[in-house]
Amino acid sequence: MLVISDTSPLSALLLAGRESLVKQIFDRVMIPKAVEKELLHAHSALPAWIEILSPLDIPLSVSEAGLDPGETEAIALALELRPDAILMDERLGRRLAVRHGLKVTGLLGLLVMARQKNLIKEVRPLIHEMIAKGSCWFDQALLETVCNSVGERWS
């Protein structure tokens, strides 16, 4: 299974020391050059298993959508390679990816998958850790929904 990732989910996982979760769920993890550049601004190195490939073309519908370079290239690369999922948290990028027929999941969705595969015991403590490290923010209602989906309580 192939996933193409944007910056923020991978960055949050790297900060929490849980980047291996994405590799345990997906056989291949790919990012475009713009995401690599954004990640290396905040992290000294990336895991060797992350593949880096730039899209051959960026459709006008993607380049003119007002996204940052990482999101733009991630969606363009996903349109070329048609991965099993694109890992993205930003709302505008997610909406555009869905409009282009891509399957999208975010960091919370990845944590739910990890829980369902018994890669983690609970999602709640990991979410708290990521929020505490300042790497992400989530709507309270969404956190409640996600925790409830795996039989946990957020509050």
Image (cartoon, rainbow, N blue to C red):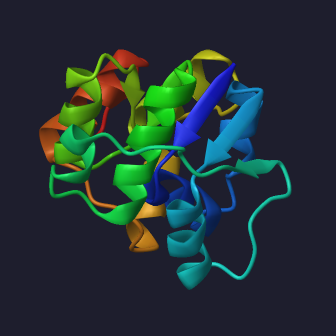
- Locate residue 103, reporting x and y percent: 39, 19
Identify the residue at image location x=64%, y=78%: 43
Nearest to the observer: residue 72 or residue 135: 72
On the rendered image, what quadrant is the C terminus found in? top left
Q: Give the quarter of the image for residue 4.
A: top right
- Locate residue 53, reporting x and y percent: 66, 49
Image position of 103 with respect to 89: above or below: above
Is 143 positioned to the left or the right of 44 in the image? left
Is residue 139 visible in the rendered image? The answer is yes
Q: Give the quarter of the image for residue 46.
A: bottom right
Identify the residue at image location x=46%, y=73%: 133
Identify the residue at image location x=43%, y=19%: 150
Nearest to the observer: residue 83 or residue 45: 83
Identify the residue at image location x=15%, y=58%: 66
- Locate residue 19, reporting x and y percent: 68, 52
Is 75 positioned to the left or the right of 62 in the image? right
